[in-house]
């Protein structure tokens, strides 16, 4: 280091110490309101931080998942803790709970006791719109509410048994 740099650095340090020493002592106004106790006028609940979003990022903004998360109904509420699934880097371990198509409506009805339109009315509306699945008996909640599935599925499990049926190989360790 050159002598001028050392001198300059030392001069700055001496000046800073002198300015600090000359400053009036810090005082606390004990009569001032504590702002930490104030709450914002419009607090927006934050979505829970879930490890699920590390791999299933498309669900962070997916309407069905986002609406449920804002009401503290998270992935874990419906799919269980699924820690073995979350920690499996090979992605061959299924979530604790999955729902086959014929079990979706039953699960949704545990919280949502009734729907504002009958299944027949929903089917008729779908026919008017030229959509697929236009028979009431073939419809499930997620046909209309949200896109609650992976866009690309590299791994498939039988949703009733949890058995790996495609896309992955169990590692033998």
Image (cartoon, rainbow, N blue to C red):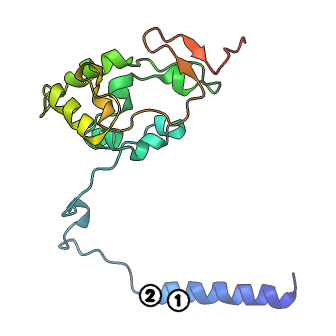
Residue 117: give x, y in percent of width and height.
Answer: 13, 33
Query: Is disc 2 surrounded by few (<14), some (14 to 19) or many (20+) residues within 10 Å?
Result: few
Q: Residue at x 40, y 18 (%)?
A: 97
Which of these two is toward me, 140 or 158?
A: 140
- Do the residues under discs 1 and 2 have CB atoms within 8 angstroms? yes
Say which residue label 2 marks: 23
Q: Check disc 1 and report its element: helix, strand or loop.
A: helix
Q: Is residue 158 left or right of residue 76?
A: right
Quarter containing the C terminus: top right
Q: Residue at x 22, y 30 (%)?
A: 123
Res 145 → quadrant: top left
Say which residue label 1 marks: 19
Res 152 → quadrant: top right
Residue 162: give x, y in percent of width and height.
Answer: 49, 12
Cα–Cα span, label 1 and label 2: 6 Å
Q: Is residue 147 left or right of residue 40?
A: right
């Amino acid at each position: 280091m050159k002598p001028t740099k050392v001198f300059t650095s030392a001069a700055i340090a001496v000046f800073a110490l002198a300015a600090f020493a000359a400053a009036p002592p810090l005082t606390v106004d004990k009569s001032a309101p504590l702002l930490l106790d104030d709450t914002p006028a419009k607090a927006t609940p934050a979505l829970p931080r879930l490890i699920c979003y590390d791999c299933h990022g498309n669900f962070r903004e997916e309407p069905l998942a986002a609406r449920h998360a804002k009401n503290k109904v998270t992935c874990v509420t419906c799919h269980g803790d699924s820690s073995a699934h979350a920690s499996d880097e090979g992605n061959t371990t299924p979530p604790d709970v999955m729902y086959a198509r014929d079990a979706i409506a039953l699960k949704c009805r545990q919280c949502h006791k009734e729907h504002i339109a009958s299944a027949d009315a929903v089917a008729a509306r779908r026919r008017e719109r030229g959509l697929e699945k236009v028979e009431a008996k073939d419809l499930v909640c997620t046909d209309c509410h949200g896109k609650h599935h992976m866009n690309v599925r590299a791994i498939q499990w039988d949703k009733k048994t949890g058995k790996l049926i495609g896309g992955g190989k169990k590692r033998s360790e």
